[in-house]
Image: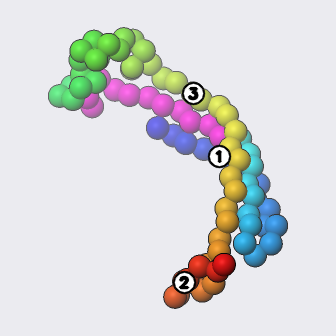
Amino acid sequence: MLPGKVLLRKRLNSLLHVSVGPVMYHYWNRFSDNNDKILGQPSLIGLDSADVYSQKTYLGGKFSLLINNLDNVLLPTTRY
């Protein structure tokens, strides 16, 4: 799997960070890597081998909200 994302991050204050941006994942799988595993016989679990071993690319977006309420990096306690 090859993930990639480009996020813009904005610090709103000392507690709150917001990130947003595009995300891309590229997936591939080889039969030789899974010969002795469950994906070596995908029909046993109801999967199509052509679908399991084809390359796939997924595109989307990500929004993240980080709330950091620690008062000290070395000896953290939460702030109320």
* Residue at (70, 56) in percent of width and height: 65
Placement of 78 over or under 18, stated as above or below: below
* Residue 28 on the magenta segment: yes
* Residue at (80, 62) in percent of width and height: 10
Write down the residue under mark 1.
5
Magenta segment boundaries in residue numbering: 23-34
Q: CA distance from mark 2 to mark 3?
A: 40 Å
* Residue at (27, 31) in percent of width and height: 33
Q: Residue 58 location, x and y as percent?
A: 59, 29
Looking at the rendered structure, the kind of residue marked 2 is: Pro
Q: Can residue 32 be seen?
A: no
Q: Earlier in the sequence, mark 3 or mark 1?
A: 1
Looking at the rendered structure, the kind of residue marked 3 is: Thr
What element does badge 1 sit on? strand
Check if mark 1's residue and mark 2's residue have beta carbons within 8 Å. no
Tell me the quarter of the picture where residue 34 sits.
top left
What element does badge 3 sit on? strand
Q: Can residue 55 be seen?
A: yes
Q: CA distance from mark 1 to mark 2?
A: 30 Å
At label 1, counting other C-alpha atoms closer than 10 Å, the crowd grade (few under 14, some 14-19, many 20 or more) is some
Q: CA distance from mark 3 to mark 1?
A: 13 Å
Check if mark 2's residue and mark 3's residue have beta carbons within 8 Å. no
What element does badge 2 sit on? loop
Looking at the rendered structure, the kind of residue marked 1 is: Lys
Q: Residue 20 location, x and y as percent?
A: 75, 49
Placement of 71 over or under 54, stated as above or below: below
Write down the residue under mark 2.
76
* Residue 44 on the magenta segment: no
Write down the residue under mark 3.
57
Q: In front of the other: label 1 or label 2?
A: 2
Q: Earlier in the sequence, mark 1 or mark 2?
A: 1
